[in-house]
Amino acid sequence: MSGVQTKDVTQDEDEMRLDRWFKKHFPHVSHGMIEKLLRKGQIRVEGGRAKGNQRLSAGQSVRIPPMPEPGEQSDAPSINRDDAAFARSLVIYQDKHLIALNKPPGLAAQGGSKIKMHLDHLLQAFGKGDQKPRLVHRLDKDTSGVMVVAKTAQSAKSLARLFQTRDVKKTYWAVCLGVPNPRAGEIKGFMKKSMDGDRELMVGAHHGEEGAQHALTRYAVADNAGQRVSWVVLRPETGRTHQLRVHMQALGHSIYGDGKYPCDYPDPEGLSRKLHLHARKIEIPRDGQTPLVLEADLPRHMADSFDALGFNPDDNLMLVEEALT
């Protein structure tokens, strides 16, 4: 084990996430171990407690507790052949800057105290240490669809900045309970994190309230099966935790399969009870070129529900997406 040490953030590491900074300097240490050290306050920035998603600034000092040396026992399991093959099967696009994956429902983006298999672990299929691709945004564990990972530190910095702004256009498909009225519009307001026992929930908040963040979602109904359920196309203009799920609940038409943010409409019969929320498309602007458009096919449970409900993705979808602009 190494002793306690302090490292300064270099200029080329400016705006890098703290957890990514750690993986750069200690590639043999798992994300789970880093999160554990952060929770215990053993990793500090400028003497203060920090979180993994904190953005560092050039010149800041980072306290590093005793860490295992390369080759010492670590809690990071190596990826096996089957998991590597599974990770590669998720690829829908790649170039020298990024890889786009179609994340299946049930796969978490990162590890945690009760999560052993996650996308960040599977990214070892594409490189180890500094060569491992980097997450630049997140999807909820039960949400499927397009996820973009960066191949280099510079690409991660550029993509993360784009995702933090409104420059990246994200389109989601959802099966919702009931039919929103009006059929197109926007949902906006403030939300904040709250605890329900040991569960973290997002709840409505007032402007100026501690922890309150503004959120805006545009929506349009693409089709409906009577008044029971509807296919809703969603475009988040901000990127808050659980934003789409909270906003559809606030509208009174929760996303089907969402036990965390329910509404009063009864569930339809004969459909999978998994969450019906899919990141269908991401459009990334490129200097001097047309935007890069990345699309992900529906997961099996949503494709089956679309078939059962008679929803046809080719019907009037262009008009629906125009209603979102």
Image (spheres, rainbow, N blue to C red):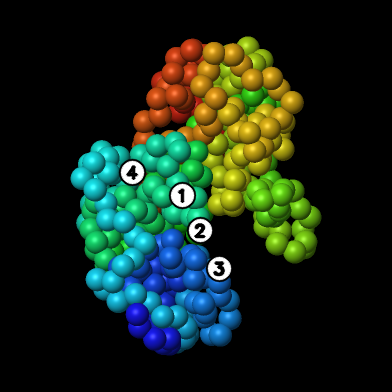
Q: Quadrant of the C terminus?
A: top right
Which amino acid type corresponds to the residue marked 2 in the rendered image? Thr
Which amino acid type corresponds to the residue marked 4 in the rendered image? Leu
Q: Is 147 placed above or below 66 here? A: above
Q: Of helix, strand and loop, which one carries label 4?
A: strand
Which amino acid type corresponds to the residue marked 3 in the rendered image? Arg
As drawn, the label of residue 39 is 3
Q: Of helix, strand and loop, which one carries label 2?
A: loop
Say which residue label 2 marks.
165
Among the two numbered marks 3 and 1 on one chain, the one whose residue lies closer to the N terminus:
3
Q: Is 171 placed above or below 30 here? A: above
Q: CA distance from mark 3 to mark 1?
A: 16 Å
Where is residue 233 drawn, in percent x and y? 53, 32
Where is residue 227 drawn, in percent x and y? 66, 15
Q: Is 134 placed above or below 263 here? A: below
- Mark 3 packing: few (<14 Cα in 10 Å), some, or many (20+)? some
Q: Nearer the viewer, residue 271 or 41?
A: 41
Q: Residue 50 appears in which quarter of the rendering?
A: bottom right
The residue shown at (44%, 53%) is: 110
The residue shown at (36%, 39%) is: 102
